[in-house]
Amino acid sequence: MTLSVLGDLNWLAVIVATIAYFALGALWYAEFAFGRAWQRSAGWDLNPPENAGVGIYAVPLATCFAATLATAMIAAASGTGNVMKGILLGLVVGIGIALPVIFVTGTFDMTKPAPKTFAAISAGYHIVGLALVGAILGLWS
């Protein structure tokens, strides 16, 4: 694979998949879903900071874009051309890369009250999110 694969990408699909991945995070980490458990496992105060502002979401959006772009490049290079192959690719990337990286961090992070819970919730989000990304990219390939 070379960087020339960037010219072969469906950039609208990359943007839509990025937004879907990011939006899933809004639901995943909402109080009614995993938000309270995730915050407790991190040892965070459950009250939102007063001056957090919208800028706090720039980093998660940028990381969703980076992961979506990398997945799109792998999809283009591997000929992933339908929804099911896209979902499989997303699961491979999520389970094969995101889960191990997050669980290594969770295993050695002694600053959190429940690091494995924190890691499980975070890894679950990325596995489901990357499967969603793969589905969108496969659908629009």
Image (cartoon, grey):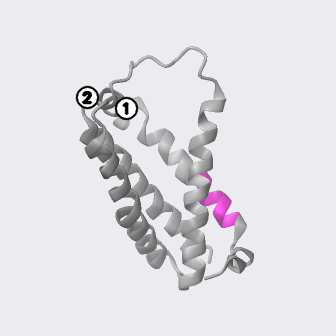
Instruction: Look at the numbered disc 2 and give the secondary structure of its residue.
Output: loop
The numbered mark at residue 50 is none
Q: Residue 62: image x %, image y %?
A: 62, 48
Looking at the figure, which quarter contains the C terminus?
A: bottom right
Q: Residue furthest bottom?
A: 79
Q: Is residue 106 left or right of residue 81?
A: left
Q: Nearer the viewer, residue 136 or 111?
A: 111
Neighbour class for label 2 at 10 Å: few (<14), some, many (≥20)? Answer: some
In the figure, 94 relative to 82: above or below? above
Neighbour class for label 1 at 10 Å: few (<14), some, many (≥20)? Answer: few
Q: Residue 10: image x %, image y %?
A: 69, 72
Residue drawn 30% across the image and 31% down it? 112
Q: Residue furthest top?
A: 50
Q: Amino acid at mark 2?
A: Pro
Quick check: is 16 in the magenta stretch?
yes
Looking at the figure, which quarter contains the N terminus?
A: bottom right
Q: Residue 35: image x %, image y %?
A: 38, 33
> Can you tell which of label 2 and label 1 is closer to the viewer?
2
Q: Which residues are magenta?
A: 12-19
Residue drawn 39% across the image and 18% down it? 45
The residue under label 1 is 32
Q: Residue furthest right?
A: 7
Q: Nearer the viewer, residue 46 or 82?
A: 46
Residue drawn 37% across the image and 45% down it? 122
Query: Mark 2 or mark 1, which has the lower sequence index?
Result: 1
Q: Main secondary structure of the magenta part?
A: helix
The numbered mark at residue 113 is 2
Q: Is residue 128 left or right of residue 138?
A: left
Instruction: Look at the numbered disc 1 and give the secondary structure of its residue.
Output: helix
Q: Amino acid at mark 1?
A: Phe
